[in-house]
Image (cartoon, helix red, strand yellow):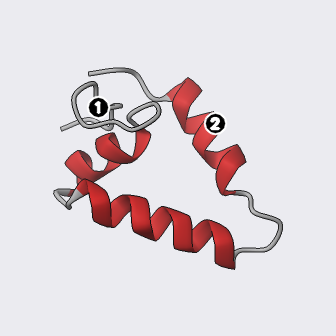
Amino acid sequence: MPLQRSRSDKMIAGVCGGIARWLGWDPTLVRLVYIVGSILSAAFPGLLVYLCLWVLMPKT
């Protein structure tokens, strides 16, 4: 299955929901990993990564 944003399982743009579907994981787990990873990384690049994925990932 290709990596695509989710239309049905989304909170903002469906990026985490799409990644969860692609990996076969629970969307809540992907969101938690994303938030913790963003907080623990230097300078919070998570927002920039999310915005890039929002633009680059096609909708399902």
Q: Residue at x 59, y 44 (%)?
A: 50
Label 2 crowd (10 A; few <14 / some 14-19 / many >=20): few
Name the residue at the bottom extreme: 40
Residue 35, placed above or below residue 5:
below
Residue 1, placed above or below residue 28:
above
Residue 23: give its label: none
Residue 28 location, x and y as percent?
29, 60
Say which element carries label 2.
helix
What amino acid is labelled 2 in the image? Answer: Leu
Lateral position of residue 37 relative to residue 57, left or right: right
Say which residue label 1 marks. 6
Name the residue at the right extreme: 43
Residue 51 location, x and y as percent?
63, 36
Say which residue label 2 marks. 51
The N terminus, quarter of image: top left
Q: Residue at x 67, y 79 (%)?
A: 40
Name the residue at the front extreme: 11
Residue 35, placed above or below residue 15:
below
Instruction: Point out the tag, 1 or 2, that comes first from the N-terminus.
Output: 1
CA gap, disc 1 and disc 2: 15 Å
The number of numbered badges drawn on the structure is 2
Rendered image quadrant of residue 53: top right
Say which element carries label 1.
loop
Q: Residue at x 83, y 66 (%)?
A: 43
Q: Nearer the viewer, residue 34 or 24?
A: 34
What amino acid is labelled 1 in the image? Answer: Ser
Rendered image quadrant of residue 27: bottom left
Residue 58 location, x and y as percent?
40, 22
Lateral position of residue 52 relative to residue 17, left or right: right
